[in-house]
Amino acid sequence: MFPKSTHETFAQKLYQTFKNNKRFIKPKLSRTSFTISHYAGEVTYLADQFIDKNKDYVVAEHQDLLTASKCPFVAGLFPPLPEESSKSSKFSSIGSRFKLQLQSLMETLNSMEPHYIRCVKPNNVLKPAIFENFNIIQQLRYGGVLEAIRISCAGYPTRHTFYEFLNRFVVLAPDVLEGNSDDKVTCQMILDKMGLTGYQVGKTKVFLRAG
């Protein structure tokens, strides 16, 4: 599709397009690599063989053969694809298929409210009672956990419904309950009476800054 392109010209295009981007760094000594400044640190990528992925075509006959397999496992790995024109299917690459799959995954995630459990490996020898501090902090940093905590602490990480807030903190000012049945108003009165700062009262919750 791009007969005159090489990994070097691809890298040069990146240098031109993203030269003013603060996240993009052009190495001084290399003409085929580039560095992305992620929140967890700088990562250098080699452009070698990047465009080769676009030449890795999916052969329609192979796709049809595997889709028609009588083995459910094999057929499940190669589900039938939506109808494509002969022109587009001719140039359908592994990279373009992956892009479509990724787009489909993002649409699915955006339509739901996923919750994640982050697993951390305490040591590399897979034995109990060994806790490697440096190894764990590295996993937390590169997994985005520390960044998520930093963002949360910069906002309002402690969040209580009005009922939870009253149940926990009404002991600070028990007299506010007299003749008052509105939880939101009562929460506001406690906050005002104690002279607290660094909070926001929402529609259903009280948001408190860290500490």
Image (spheres, grey):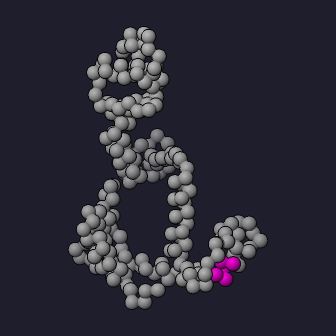
Examine the residues drawn in magenta and state their main secondary structure.
helix
- Placement of 172 over or under 12, stated as above or below: above
Q: Position of residue 46 (x, y in %)?
A: 36, 74
Q: Residue at x 61, y 81 (%)?
A: 85
Instruction: Please tell me how many numbered marks the rendered image carries.
Output: 0
Q: Position of residue 100 (x, y in %)?
A: 54, 69
Task: Please give the range of residues in magenta.
Answer: 60-64
- Placement of 9 over or under 113, stated as above or below: below
Q: Position of residue 160 (x, y in %)?
A: 44, 29
* Residue 160 inside the magenta-drawn segment: no
Q: Residue at x 41, y 52 (%)?
A: 143
Q: Which quadrant of the structure image shows residue 178?
A: top left
Q: Position of residue 101 (x, y in %)?
A: 55, 66
* Residue 192, visible in the rendered structure: yes
Q: Nearer the viewer, residue 60 or 138?
A: 60
Q: Nearer the viewer, residue 186 or 3?
A: 186
Q: Is residue 88 left or right of residue 200?
A: right
* Residue 59, visible in the rendered structure: no
Residue farthest along the left direction in this orientation: 28
Q: Which quadrant of the structure image shows residue 105?
A: bottom right
Residue farthest along the right direction in this orientation: 70
* Residue 62 inside the magenta-drawn segment: yes
Q: Residue at x 61, y 78 (%)?
A: 84
The quarter in which the C terminus is drawn is top left
Q: Is residue 61 left or right of residue 15?
A: right
Q: Residue at x 46, y 81 (%)?
A: 52
- Placement of 135 over or under 47, stated as above or below: above
